[in-house]
Amino acid sequence: MADVAIEPQHDPVNPPLVLGNPTYGDVTNTVSDIVERKTPKKWFIAFGISASLTLLLGAMLGYLVLNGIGVWGNNSPVGWAWDITNFVFWIGIGHAGTLISAILFLFRQKWRTSINRAAEAMTLFAVACAGIFPLFHVGRPWRAYWLFPVPNPELSMWQNFRSPLLWDVFAVSTYATVSALFWYVGLVPDLATIRDRAAARGDKIRKYVFGVLSLGWRGSAKHWKHYEMAYLILAGLSTPLVLSVHTIVSFDFAVSIIPGWHTTIFPPYFVAGAIFSGFAMVMTLMIIARWALNLEHLVTMKHLENMNKVMLATGLIVGYAYATEMFIAWYGGNPYERFAFANRALGPYAWAYWTMVSCNVLVPQLFWFKKLRTNIPVMFVCSLLINVGMWFERFVIIVTSLHRDFLPSSWGYFRPTIVDILTFVGSFGLFLTLFLLFVRFLPMIAISEVKGVMATSKGSAAAH
Amino acid sequence: MSLIFPKSTDKFLRIGVGVLALLVAGGVGLLGYLLHPEVAKTGYTPKQPIDYSHKLHAGNLGMDCLYCHSTVDKAGFAAIPATEVCMNCHERIKPQSPEIVKIRESYATGKPIEWVKVHRLPDYVYFNHQAHVTAGVSCVSCHGRVDQMIEVRQVQPLTMTWCLDCHRNPAPNVRPAELVTKLSWKPDRDPAEIGREIIAAKNIAPPVNCSGCHR
């Protein structure tokens, strides 16, 4: 690949997606160097902390398996609490990766190229964290395969195909599989780049490991032709999944008859919320990564600003959904529905409801102002607050709807146990550990795709 | 650039994938066999605190099951006999046998004998002995030929599949209620035919919905 100097571009509407006139070689060097350089001390510190939290997660789950799920605070009438909240929270986080990699790809949004790899990796890790919670919520995780329709000599019956909980199993496992394939296919050319650089430097271990991982990629025209077709097909397969997974997650609630859950608005409301929280998490991670790894010229203000715009849009949809829920509860005239929503805003969990509204509806309004949506400290704090708010959204939906049963004698108030709290904290440890390993050992920016959107390649960029 | 892997790698890779697939299939098959309830869950024979022989009492001497397990047709729980029941006879029969001495000690001190439960169901399953026994399901259907066992062992897997097999088709296991404890009973015609007649007469409808047993 020849090193080509690039003319700076001065387009105020569409600023360049790569700053500082790097050559193709510079981009390859910058991204590959993150993987190849000596492991920096700050990586070890971060990894030490996150790996400790992962061990904490393992300890909590082990304790749960030995003692039963009574170690969590869930009990009648609140049978679903932090576990399902955390499941929906993590699954939601995962949505940004697929949206960026599949939908923005099909819509030819070139700004996706610098962030799609990391966002897809984040998706996989978030889905892994999400999967833990329902898996251990079943109480006997070694029996979890009973959820799949495979021959089972213990059971003599089919799964309940009319239950959204079973649809969830298929939706989430399909999503995890397709996301992993999509991510890996996208990685292949860059894995080959790392392999070739390792071979040139005489780095034996990396040469063989990446030699296997890159599946014999040689970068011939034929390879690229097949690769791009495969990538397009996977993008097409992933696109409906972005919408279907959280739709089906919302069915876990919407298909039941609990006031506060039984609403038709849930699928679009959940999908918008998932993209909202997913972008907030991508934002948090990318701000840290571009600062720690000096990638400001590849992950530019333009990328961050676009993500803020997506958050503003999805935040407005979520706010509109909150208002619609309240309006329909009043307009529908069902006394149980009215009670459920009045209780949500004014009852014992009002503190959680208003935390949710402040974080999810008020905070993103800051992004109307260009000064604020291009200010890194502001967007960092906003992205954290949005994720706090989105966690509380799931908590509010799940716990406030359950804690007031139809029978007032069964009313209760959920309080998390220390095991609930440490399990959730531990899931962040797992997420960050996987992300740190990814950043350390794999190219975190799609080298070949970024080259496609650099100024000199304007004419050929459409091919990507 | 020189090749990292020789050309033959492809061949080894293909063979390797085939071997791996066979190993995985074999492993799953072996595990499936070992964990199959027929294999994994039957044959449990715990050591009891007293060398009591069901074969001697229920088989050779012909005692009725109900003499000791007196609640099975009246209550959900099948009672383990109290020491006093043993003493009804062993007050006088073989009082000096070392095993009987243990029973006499229990009788004298009031400390019950800690029999080990053989047939254990999970605590989320509701099982009622009376309902089954009065419907005409014999002891032998679930416990096997206890009258031929010196030490009692589990002969049926006690899985949900096994419960459902009978709940879905109870006729072969239903007999006249007065014959439930006759473990060696052999009808002179098809037992399913007899079962069907009793089911029709008593209007027996075993539940097959979840809440029948998981209450």
Image: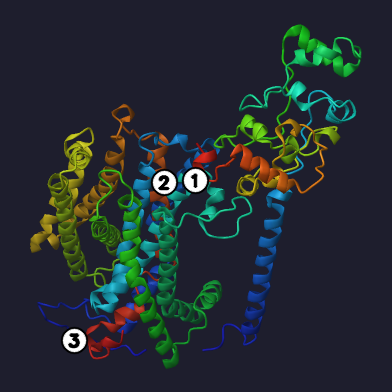
Q: Nearer the viewer, mark 3 or mark 1?
A: 1
Q: Sequence order check: which comes first, mark 3 or mark 1?
A: 3
Whether tag 2 and tag 3 are in contact, CB under 8 A, the answer is: no
Whether tag 3 and tag 1 are in contact, CB under 8 A, the answer is: no
Seen in the image, is A434 located left or right of residue B127? left
User: Against A269, is A71 above or below?
Assistant: above
Q: CA distance from mark 2 to mark 3?
A: 48 Å
Query: What residue sits 75% from the left and 8% below the top?
Result: B109
Whether tag 1 and tag 2 are in contact, CB under 8 A, the answer is: yes
Q: Position of residue B117 (x, y in %)?
A: 70, 30
Q: Sequence order check: which comes first, mark 2 or mark 3?
A: 3
Residue bearing mark 2: A426
Disc 1 residue crowd, few under 14, some 14–19, many 20+, Cα 10 Å: some
Q: Nearer the viewer, residue B39 or B212?
A: B212
Indicate the quadrant where residue A32 lies.
bottom left
Q: Nearer the viewer, residue A442 or A37?
A: A442
Q: Amino acid at mark 2?
A: Gly
Q: Amino acid at mark 1?
A: Gly
Disc 2 residue crowd, few under 14, some 14–19, many 20+, Cα 10 Å: many
Element type at mark 1: helix
Chain bearing tag 1 is: A
Seen in the image, is A248 located left or right of residue A22? right
Q: CA distance from mark 1 to mark 2?
A: 8 Å
Q: Amino acid at mark 3?
A: Glu
Residue A7, disc: 3
Query: What residue sits 37% from the left and 62% below the top?
Result: A123
Element type at mark 2: helix
Chain bearing tag 2 is: A
Disc 3 residue crowd, few under 14, some 14–19, many 20+, Cα 10 Å: few
Query: What residue sits 35% from the left and 59% below the top?
Result: A248
Chain bearing tag 3 is: A
